[in-house]
Amino acid sequence: MKAAVIYYSYNGNCALVAEAIKGEMNAEVFEIKTVDTKKRKGIFLILWGVFQVKGNKKPEFQPLSIDVNAFDLIILGTPVWAGSPAPAMVSFLSKTEIKGKKVAIFCCHGGGKGSVFDKLKALLPGNTIAGEIDFTNPAKEGRAALKGQIGDWVKTLGT
């Protein structure tokens, strides 16, 4: 099964998970990068993130060279912002047609997944959701624990 991991990562957590998935299943990895590269921190990051989500912002992202139709399994990863997928992932999904695919989703958060999976599924009509998993502060987890959790999840995806 040919798999692609498409993710957005603001602080590196989703990047860490995406690379671990790649290692478990030899998937191709694609990072969504926004045109706005300014890094916000602390309370400014939180306020900016909430404004982005609540304002339904769809930031521009750099061109991503992927033909989703070339893959049997698409794995999407996003941080949780205000209980929702990061606006960059929403923007990507609004501009990329993914139909008739087996899709798995993961999210990274520091305190709760909110309704991120329901919102992602709503953006993916016409696809089969193969699985979902959330990671709490994966960069703080031991690599062995993260690898084990991802290895177990990957097995459930039918790869």
Image (cartoon, rainbow, N blue to C red):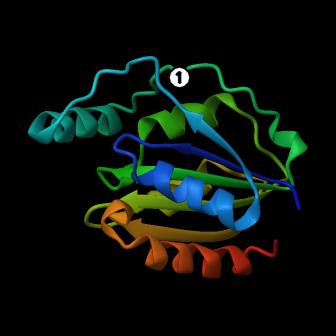
Q: Find disc 1 in the rendering and name its residue.
A: 61
Q: Is residue 118 visible?
A: no
Where residue 43 appears, x then y in whole percent? 10, 40
Q: What secondary structure is marked by label 1? A: loop
Of 101 and 137, the residue lying toward us: 137
Left or right: where 141 falls relative to 16: left
Q: Tell me if 26 is positioned left or right of 107 in this view.
A: right
Q: Is residue 37 above or below residue 41?
A: above
Give the position of the C terminus as an image quadrant.
Answer: bottom right
What residue is drawn where x is 52% and y is 38%? Answer: 90
| Relative image position of residue 130 (x, y in whole percent) | 72, 69
Instruction: Look at the image and tell me in which quarter the N terminus lies.
Output: bottom right
Q: Position of residue 80 (x, y in %)?
A: 37, 53
Badge 1 crowding class, 10 Å Cα cut-off, few under 14, some 14 to 19, many 20 or more, is: some
Above or below, 51 against 59 in this view is below
Residue sitting at x 50%, y 28% = 33
Relative placement, left or right, of 90 versus 139 is: right
* Residue under the image location 81 percent in, 46 percent down: 99
For image coordinates 38% across by 73% down, the residue present is 142
Quadrant assignment, res 22:
bottom right
> Total marks drawn?
1
- Residue 49 percent location from the top left of the image: 27, 37
Q: Looking at the image, is 87 positioned above or below residue 71?
A: above
Do we see residue 18 in this rendering? yes
Instruction: Identify which amino acid the numbered label 1 is placed on.
Output: Phe
The image quarter in which residue 69 lies: top right
